[in-house]
Amino acid sequence: MIRLIIFSAILLFALSCNKQEDRVLLRVRNVSTEDFKNVRLYQQSMGDVDAGKETGYEEFEMAYRIAYVQLELKGVTVSLIPIDFVGETPLENGKYTFEIGVNPLAQSVYDQITLQLVED
């Protein structure tokens, strides 16, 4: 009987383990005081992200420390567009958060947002 209980406990534990770290999971956190609308990360829609809030994790096949980001800020579409990914190494499987902020010294729609990757 004890063997059955131990086996059941081990089986239950094994089945409850989350395998999400077997892939790249990304989310977006808005670290600004402005609301973001229609956020896109690597061409994938992440929805609206209010100031100080974050999205849920989304699965990506491949991602890098730098990313293409597009969003609406105060009714204007702004973008962060990497020139290329040469020399970049794909992220290892796991959970990551891209923290997006607003650049107060921006000169154009292409430098209005800041991006920082955090490994969760």
Image (cartoon, helix red, strand yellow):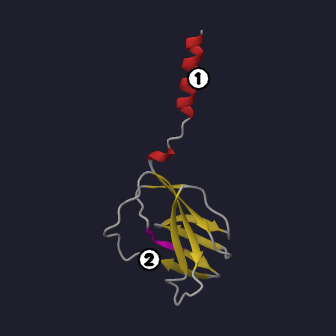
Callout 1 secondary element: helix
Q: Residue at x 44, y 76 (%)?
A: 81
Please name the residue shown 57% across and 82% down the image. 103
Q: Is residue 3 above or below residue 26?
A: above
Residue 72 in the image: x percent, y percent? 59, 77
Q: Mark 2 — residue? A: 81
| In the rendered image, the vertical position of residue 74 relative to residue 92, given as above or below | below
Residue closest to the eye, 50 or 116? 116
Q: Please name the amino acid that badge 2 sits on.
A: Ile
- The quadrant the C terminus occupies is bottom right
Identify which residue, 116 or 17, lies in the foreground: 116
**Residue type pointed to by label 1:** Ala
Quarter of the figure with the N terminus: top right
> Secondary structure beneath disc 2?
loop
Does residue 25 appear to the left or right of 90 in the view shown?
Answer: right
Pick the front one: 90 or 74 = 90
Magenta residues, as a range?
66-70
Q: Residue at x 63, y 62 (%)?
A: 54
The x, y position of residue 88, in whole percent, is 35, 66
Label 1 neighbour load within 10 Å: few <14, some 14-19, many 20+: few
In three-dimensional space, the C-alpha distance between marks 1 and 2, rounded to whole angstroms, equals: 49 Å
Mark 2, other Cα within 10 Å: few <14 / some 14–19 / many ≥20: some
Q: Nearer the viewer, residue 96 or 38?
A: 96
Q: Which residue is mark 1?
A: 9
